[in-house]
Amino acid sequence: MPRIRQLPPDVVTKIAAGEVIERPASVVKELLENSIDAGSTRIDIDLDAGGTELIRVVDDGCGIEPDDLPLAFAQHATSKLASADDLFRIGTMGFRGEALASVAGVGQVTLQSCVRNAASDAGAEVKCDGGVLSPVKPWNGAPGTRIEVRHLFYNVPVRKKFLKSVATELGHVCETVTRIALSHPTLHLTLKHNGRLVYDIPASAGLLDRIALFFTGEVRDALYELDSGPGPMRLTGYIADPKCDRGNAKLQYLFVNGRWFRDRSIAHALQESFRGLLMTGRYAIGFLFLTVPADKVDVNVHPTKAEVRFQENSLVYSLVRGTIKNRLLKENLVPQLIVPQGQEVGFRGQGPEIRDQRSEDSQQKTEAPTLFTSPRREQAEQTLAPWERGELADPFWRTPTGVQVPTIPPGRTATVNERVEALGPNPQPPPSREGEKEKESTPLSSSPPEGRGEKITERSESSIPSESVSDSPLPAGRGVGGVGSESPPFPTAIPTPPPSTAIQLHDAYLVLETSEGMLVIDQHALHERILFEQLRTRIRAGQLEVQRLLIPEPMDLPAEQAALVLEAADALRELGLEVSDFGGNTILLSSYPTLLGRKPPHEILRSVIDHLVTQERPPTKEAMLHLLMATMACKAAVKAGDKLSPEEIAYLLHLREMAEDSHHCPHGRPTSLLFSRHELDKQFRRT
């Protein structure tokens, strides 16, 4: 039986550091809290290699007396508590007196300080290397405190091995700075990394300005101010309009008495306030600041002070939920349709010249070998759906409302006269969408739409049906497609099914008669599976068609999300999403997969980012590709509520026959349910 023995001081220090210091961001948090408690009005932070090699924090606080410098590294030595009763009315950020001792146990620390308004202007300096203190030396510097932490975890290689990349560690530090900047809006903060300025937040920048800096102006402009009114407990802050939601809870910031914390109960109250205003899986945006009497909240319940305990938790819950609910009732939350300026609907710039040129170029294109070959797969790859052609006026390959589509025999395309006859005796152009300018009857330009460039990989000639045009061209806006001098060709290989064969119910389900009975198909789940397999096939074969943007789209992201996207840049490039660093927290989106052209490029990337930040641990490259392909296919597929024409239904069912697994969507949901003839007869008591 092993004997009980006292652990050496260095082992005790390393154990304590394991509870408090997890990564460089933990060191930055402890040092910033000490600077705030010292009454600092400006704090400068310098990092090297994400904080693993150097963390320097300089403040203009009250400073530390020379005789107290060695005590700063002692366990449980603090100037913030005098008795046990003070633990129940804590008004400072720190109080345990173990932060510097824990940091010094796993790093090389240099502490320099000069007391403000002291009789002597001379300061003092002390060094602590792995818990070993050096003698105190004089130091001539400005009033305040200067702390350097070098070579974090140099004496604990096991801990250092578990640190992430420099970009990830920098993202965590930026998140720490964000929380401090939001909770103390009058504090001047600067952050530099490898000599490069990341943040410079002046004291004059208010809370809204800081929200715009960290989370873009889009979030700031959608905020509603909160104030529960004076009282023992008070809630202030901002919540965002329900239309400005997110796919994760990363933008829910909770503060109590100037301290960031996390609490499932308060987060639930925030989310519950938006019940009925957000779709399932969407999260509200909120910046909530609680003011609670110090003796009504216990902040000494978590090693890193990330959690608190309220004495009257139900009262705080009701305060948060009631204040937000009442604020939302004062606003008109009816969504408004806003067409982005400069965004084209459909592909209006592609005329016959471009299509002819594309056909000529595709003749010289050689087919790359595929990993899996089969007659069904080859036929599916050679068959382009109408939404892939990019020739229809509507973003989702549908016939304009009120237009009757003629039945064209297989093997032949429609002539202009047949299309005019299909429009009736008094053909009228389809109604224009809100915010869309009327096109004049002028020849189409051969330039591509604004913001879109040439495709990296062109489609094969066999996938683009040729069209023989006779008679005079139709006026612009009079074709079946609704735009241009020519209408898009009808699918020649897929005849329109009889009305009794496939119908659409509630704009969400397709009902199909089969030899076995009645098949009910979820149109969204089926289209999602089809897009997923097309993405996977083309990525494996190296034939994914990518649309490059003439002008890359900049996207402002929080620092943590920007670092996450840049880390996944290689996987995103395989998916056709090419991203690059533009400086600060801005990334540039240079391309997107043509297959998903129904969605704006920034919306595709936004959905991918929302999915990435919800992952608790980084997935493998194969798993990431699968997850991202499934997410992209889900966002680009038709939704419940989308009205489909008979041609669209027929094409969707045709592609279903070509799919490898048409039974489930990439997320595991069934795409169809079969009601057998026997079961129907049984329910109607025919048997």
Image (tube, rainbow, N blue to C red):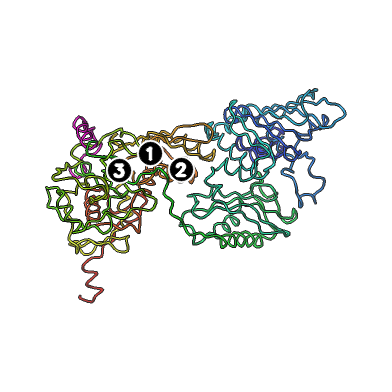
Closest to the observer: 638 or 75?
A: 638
Query: Left or right: where does residue 584 sit relative to residue 106?
Result: left
Q: Which secondary structure lies at badge 3?
A: loop
84 versus 593 height, above or below:
below
The magenta segment: 354-377
The kind of secondary structure element at disc 1 is: helix
User: Mark 1 — residue?
Assistant: 622
Q: Gap in Å between the C-alphas at discs 2 and 1?
A: 17 Å
Q: Earlier in the sequence, mark 3 or mark 1?
A: 3
Evaluate whether residue 345 shows in this view. yes
Q: Is residue 532 magenta?
A: no
Residue type, label 3? Arg
Query: Nearer the viewer's eye, disc 3 or disc 1?
Result: 3
Residue 348, disc = 3
Across and down, in percent, residue 633 comes to: 35, 47
Q: Earlier in the sequence, mark 2 or mark 1?
A: 2
Residue situated in front as seen by the camera: 514 or 210: 210
What amino acid type should be assigned to the residue bearing mark 1? Glu
